[in-house]
Image (cartoon, rainbow, N blue to C red):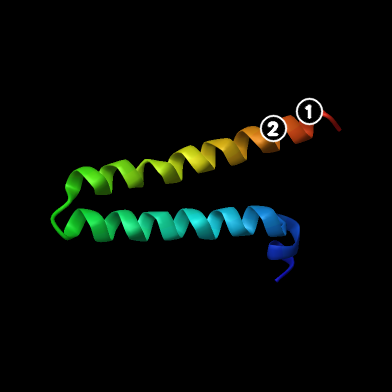
Amino acid sequence: MNYFKKLGTANLLMLILCALIILVAEYLFLNGSPEHGLFVGLWAPTLLGVMIYLKLVDNDGK
């Protein structure tokens, strides 16, 4: 539980959103719409990249 406190609410919500995006992309891909599944599936790494960037910018200010 200490890990979740250290992670922070905003980061935890963004990670949950990434997991949800991956599930939706899998659903789309496996139900006959591979192009839409790939398009939606690329959102998760983009969101993770934004999270890393914001973390780096935040640490640079300290």
Relative horizontal placement of residue 11, taking residue 27 as reference (left or right):
right
Q: Furthest-right residue in view?
A: 62
Relative horizontal placement of residue 22, taking residue 56 as reference (left or right):
left
* Callout 1: SS: helix
Q: Amino acid at mark 1?
A: Asp
Mark linked to residue 60:
1
Q: Which residue is mark 2?
A: 56
Q: Quadrant of residue 39?
A: top left
How crowded is the residue under tag 2: few (<14 C-alpha within 10 Å), some, or many (20+)?
A: few
Asked if the residue at tag 1 contacts the one at tag 2, i.e. Cβ–Cβ closer than 8 Å, the answer is: yes
Relative horizontal placement of residue 17, taking residue 33 as reference (left or right):
right
Residue that appears at 34% across and 59% down:
24
Residue that appears at 13% across and 55% down:
32
Q: What is the distance, in whole Å, between disc 2 and disc 1 at their CAs?
A: 6 Å
Front residue of 33/47: it is 33
Which x, y percent locates residue 8? Answer: 72, 57
